[in-house]
Image (cartoon, rainbow, N blue to C red):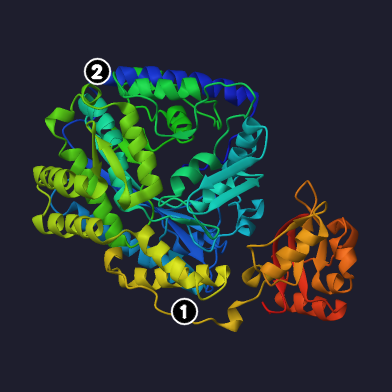
């Protein structure tokens, strides 16, 4: 989520000055390009590793600030939620053993974090979406207490003018509303950076868009969100919807999403991309800036383009153009933002090598992509790959081809060639691209999660499944064996000590009646499904009552056949609990009121039911 802004006032005076700095930065970048001051002739790689913090029960734990204080290393920084942290790796020149160097540094920093996390009673997990994350961890009290994050939330909410809404359909469906941007915190990624020659930027950027679909498809690792099986890379849908500030209306109008793939091939220069984003998106954050970038250039120095970089950090292209200054030299790079975190570090480094190899090995025929490939073809490939992963059928140069064939027959040879072009150690090339090939043939992290999620679901309640799955992911991650070699979870052992809250053991797939339903329908539904308690909702979808079999048994046959409505017979004063009610409290309520079940509600909305059988 970028830099911290400690001194910002976020007032109108600061905003007015910031706008001028932003415009000056665009002009300054154009001058740097015209005067050939952007670094050329060298290629560097870099990465950002986002990670999840869990407690010993493998649920999110908000200890990021305590952890960062113990680590005391500038490579580490905060994220939006206090159960996530990020490692910023050093840049390495693309040559020789650079991928081994990235892997070594990542492992060293990760182990440092793991040691300090264990002192706090926490684990660190690499995963695109933490399976055990729940609605409870999306409250504002889980936001990292830093002014920038609160301001980002405040401004995006005001732009939206309504609550943020999720609606994602996969095997299951998730429909949910939320009052903050913390949906975004469910996403953790492994962001890749590649320095690009200024003269080749547009060709490289268009190529990065063309290959995004197949690269994403073989890296999928986020199939689950809040116990729902959705897309193979659910992060793609989740991230867009979690930061979607577009207003819904009855009018049919074009609106540009703040998170997106883009809408066309790029033509002229990197400044055109920045201009397009400034033209399409409102300024979210500001900060005080001392000197105009134009004045800095005039004085013979290199500007940092602070306003442009801050603005660019609030527009979330999946392939994002970036400007930076290193060793007092300005450079351009492409940031790949769609790769998920995990399943292991070796999988991540393999993903990195595959993408960089593809970028470096771009065949000459792809120098002018608009002439051979429709942009919507590339965009659709990206969406389809996020949905179906390794099983995707893509459109490539106008022909249908499976993702597996495209990677094995065309893309891997390009990646091998690209890495050899930069004299990457042949052992690293074969080791890392060999992992990509094996994963293409055997399965991704998303497929492993789905297979084991379905298997465990036959044995136990949903909450227990998510915990067992996360526990197994952590254990396999510790081995650092690539995901295509991970064994299946054969049997999970349930521990009574792990059950604390009603939400962990409640039933969530419920039969429901409505107040105006006829009693004969209610009787049939209860008999067919062998259930003794059935919740009743009103027309607003709120819990209105509870119908029990003991009440129905007391009716004579004539009464059962009459036009009686459920509302006439249901219990209207219902004892309810919440998902975070302690199980011991639920037991006591059942005993005290001599009842066999308790509806579980969030507000007036029914989300589950707990019965004596569950206890």
Percent coordinates x, y for residue 599 in the rendering: 75, 65
Q: Residue at x 33, y 63 (%)?
A: 344
Above or below, comparing residue 235 to residue 14 in the picture: below
- The crowd level at tag 2 (other Cα within 10 Å; few <14, some 14-19, many 20+) is few
Above or below, comparing residue 430 to residue 555 in the picture: above
Of residue 544 and residue 298, the one placed in the foreground of this image is: 544
Q: Residue at x 65, y 24 (%)?
A: 250
Percent coordinates x, y for residue 449 in the rendering: 41, 63
Distance in Å between CA atoms under marks 1 and 2: 64 Å
The mark lying in front, picked from 1 and 2, is 1
Q: First in sequence: mark 1 or mark 2?
A: 2
Q: Which mark is residue 492?
A: 1
Of residue 70 and residue 526, the one placed in the foreground of this image is: 526
Q: Residue at x 86, y 56 (%)?
A: 565
Is mark 1 in CB contact (under 8 Å) with mark 2? no
Q: Secondary structure at mark 1?
A: loop
Q: Taking the image as drawn, is residue 578 in sight?
A: no
Q: Secondary structure at mark 2?
A: loop
Q: Is 86 left or right of 464, judged from the image as shown? A: left
Q: Which mark is residue 408?
A: none
Q: Is 542 left or right of 282, judged from the image as shown? A: right
Q: Is 469 left or right of 344, judged from the image as shown? A: right
Q: Quadrant of residue 50?
A: bottom left
Q: Taking the image as drawn, is residue 364 in sight?
A: yes
Q: Is 479 left or right of 2, judged from the image as shown? A: left
- Which residue has dot 2 on it? 35
């Amino acid at each position: 989520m970028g830099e911290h802004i400690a001194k910002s006032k976020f007032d109108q005076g600061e905003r007015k000055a910031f706008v001028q700095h932003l415009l000056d930065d665009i002009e300054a970048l154009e001058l740097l390009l015209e005067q050939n001051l952007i670094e050329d002739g060298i290629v560097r790689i870099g990465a950002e590793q986002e990670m999840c913090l869990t407690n010993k029960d493998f649920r999110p734990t908000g200890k990021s600030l305590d952890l960062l204080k113990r680590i005391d290393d500038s490579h580490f920084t905060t994220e939006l939620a206090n159960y996530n942290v990020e490692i910023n790796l050093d840049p390495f020149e693309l040559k020789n053993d650079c991928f081994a160097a990235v892997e070594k540094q990542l492992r060293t920093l990760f182990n440092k974090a793991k040691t300090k996390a264990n002192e706090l009673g926490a684990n660190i997990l690499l995963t695109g979406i933490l399976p055990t994350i729940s609605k409870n961890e999306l409250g504002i009290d889980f936001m990292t207490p830093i002014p920038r994050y609160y301001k980002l939330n405040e401004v995006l909410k005001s732009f939206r003018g309504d609550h943020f809404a999720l609606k994602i359909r996969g095997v299951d469906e998730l429909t949910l509303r939320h009052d903050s941007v913390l949906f975004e915190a469910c996403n953790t990624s492994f962001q890749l950076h590649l320095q690009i020659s200024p003269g080749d930027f547009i060709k490289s950027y268009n190529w990065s868009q063309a290959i995004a679909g197949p690269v994403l498809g073989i890296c999928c690792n986020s199939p689950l969100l809040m116990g729902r099986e959705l897309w193979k890379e659910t992060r793609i849908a989740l991230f867009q919807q979690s930061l979607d500030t577009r207003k819904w209306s009855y009018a049919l109008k074009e609106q540009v999403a703040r998170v997106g793939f883009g809408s066309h091939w790029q033509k002229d220069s990197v400044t055109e991309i920045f201009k397009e984003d400034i033209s399409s998106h409102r300024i979210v954050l500001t900060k005080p800036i001392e000197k105009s970038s134009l004045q800095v250039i005039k004085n013979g120095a290199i500007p940092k383009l602070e306003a442009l970089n801050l603005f660019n950090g609030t527009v979330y292209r999946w392939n994002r153009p970036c400007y930076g200054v290193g060793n007092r030299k300005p450079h351009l790079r492409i940031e790949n933002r769609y790769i998920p975190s995990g399943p292991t570090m070796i999988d991540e480094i393999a993903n990195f090598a595959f993408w960089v190899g593809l970028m470096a090995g771009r065949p000459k025929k792809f120098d002018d992509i608009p002439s051979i490939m429709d942009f919507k073809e590339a965009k659709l490939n990206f969406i389809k790959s996020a949905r179906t992963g390794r099983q995707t059928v893509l459109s490539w140069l106008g022909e249908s081809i499976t993702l597996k064939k495209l990677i094995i027959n065309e893309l891997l040879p390009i990646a091998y060639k690209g890495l050899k072009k930069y004299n990457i150690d042949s052992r690293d090339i074969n080791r890392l691209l060999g992992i990509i090939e094996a994963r293409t043939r055997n399965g991704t992290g998303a497929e492993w999660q789905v297979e084991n999620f379905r298997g465990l679901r036959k044995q136990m309640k949903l909450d227990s499944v998510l915990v067992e799955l996360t526990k197994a992911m952590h254990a396999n991650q510790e081995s650092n064996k690539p995901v295509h070699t991970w064994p299946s979870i054969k049997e999970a052992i349930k521990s009574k000590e792990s059950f604390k809250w009603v939400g962990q053991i409640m039933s969530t797939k419920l039969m429901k009646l409505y107040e105006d339903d006829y009693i004969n329908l209610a009787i049939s539904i209860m008999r067919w499904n062998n259930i003794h308690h059935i919740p009743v909702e009103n027309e607003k979808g709120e819990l209105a009552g509870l119908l029990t079999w003991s009440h129905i048994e007391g009716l004579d046959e004539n009464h059962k056949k009459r036009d009686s409505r459920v509302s006439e017979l249901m219990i209207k004063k219902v004892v309810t609990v919440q998902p975070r009610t302690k199980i011991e409290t639920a037991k006591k309520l059942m005993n005290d009121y001599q009842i066999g079940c308790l509806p579980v509600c969030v507000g007036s909305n029914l989300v589950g039911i707990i019965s004596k059988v569950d206890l």
